[in-house]
Structure formats: structure tokens, C-alpha cells
Image: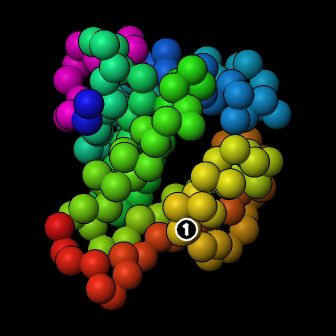
Amino acid sequence: MLRRYAPADLTDLLDAWYEAARVAHSFLPEEFFERERMQIADEWIPLADVTVYEHEGHVVGFVAMVGNEVGGLFVHPDFQRRGIGRALLDSARESRPFLELDVFEANEIGRRFYRAYGFRQLDRHMSEATGHPELRLRFERAATEPDG
């Protein structure tokens, strides 16, 4: 079930993020995940419009939006390939004319998902935080889609 984030969701949200991020970002060192976990909890979640996917009382996925920017989309690996990521992005695009995000070039799981969803590449740059190349992607609502 999709719903808005509540502070009580933080532990489950961080667990889903960590498990998914370790799989998708296996090329990053463990220290990165430790730093990022703190930043997500302390900085990013308070700034973002967060929608979670709850399954049997636990958050198993989320999308964090800052304006049109997808700050994070993560689904626990045990729940991937069930349409949860698509449902989260669908909810994010309902009230936005476009979505943009950065994805690590080495994140084949994420790149494949975003390509199938309909994102297109705008550019390629180096991540200041990691030194790894990232791709800037954009999804635009089709002209025939109604506004949210």
C-alpha cells in the first residue's frame, strides 16, 4: 500500500534503503553507506516529500522527491520485481510535469529500471561525493497524459 511517510517509518525505510543500495551500488565502499545513512535520516528525509510502500506493516520501499528531483527510489531486494518501484514513481509523477534524477553509471539495476520506465539520458558527469560517473536522466509526461 502506498502512503505518506511518517517519522515512525524511519527504521524500516533505512533498512530498505541499505539493503537495496548495497545490491545496486556494490562498487561503493561500506564507509559510503554509513555516511549516507546518517545524511538520509538527518538531512534528506526532512527536506523531501516521501511516499512509502508498506507491506504487512513494514515499509519495504520509498520514493523521496524534492520538487521534480527524485532524491531516492529504493525497494528492498526481497520485494523487487513486483511493481513497487513503478507504483512509487507513478505516484511521484502524478503532480509533476517531469522527473529528473542521477543514477550511477555502474548501477545496472537502476539504469535498466529507469530505461524501461521511459527516462532518457540528459548528460554524464562525475559524482562529487564518490568520484564515480553518474547519468542525469529525465522523464517527461506525454502530451496526452492529464495533469495530476
Colouring mode (rainbow / by chain / secondary structure / one colour): rainbow
Q: Which residue is mark 1?
A: 119
* Residue 7 drawn at (x, y percent): 22, 19
Quarter residue 95 falls in: bottom left
Quarter residue 58 falls in: top left
Placement of 141 over or under 84, stated as above or below: below
Quarter residue 109 falls in: top right
Q: Is residue 60 left or right of residue 123?
A: left
Residue 55 is a magenta residue: no
Q: Is residue 47 left or right of residue 35?
A: left
Q: Residue furthest bottom?
A: 143
Image point (71%, 19%), residue name: 31
**Which of 4 and 86 lies nearest the eye of the viewer?**
86
Q: Main secondary structure of the magenta part?
A: helix
The answer to whether one can see residue 38 in this image is no
* Residue 68 drawn at (x, y percent): 35, 63
* Residue 110 drawn at (x, y percent): 64, 48
Image point (76%, 54%), residue name: 105
Task: Specify the segment rendered in magenta.
Answer: 3-13
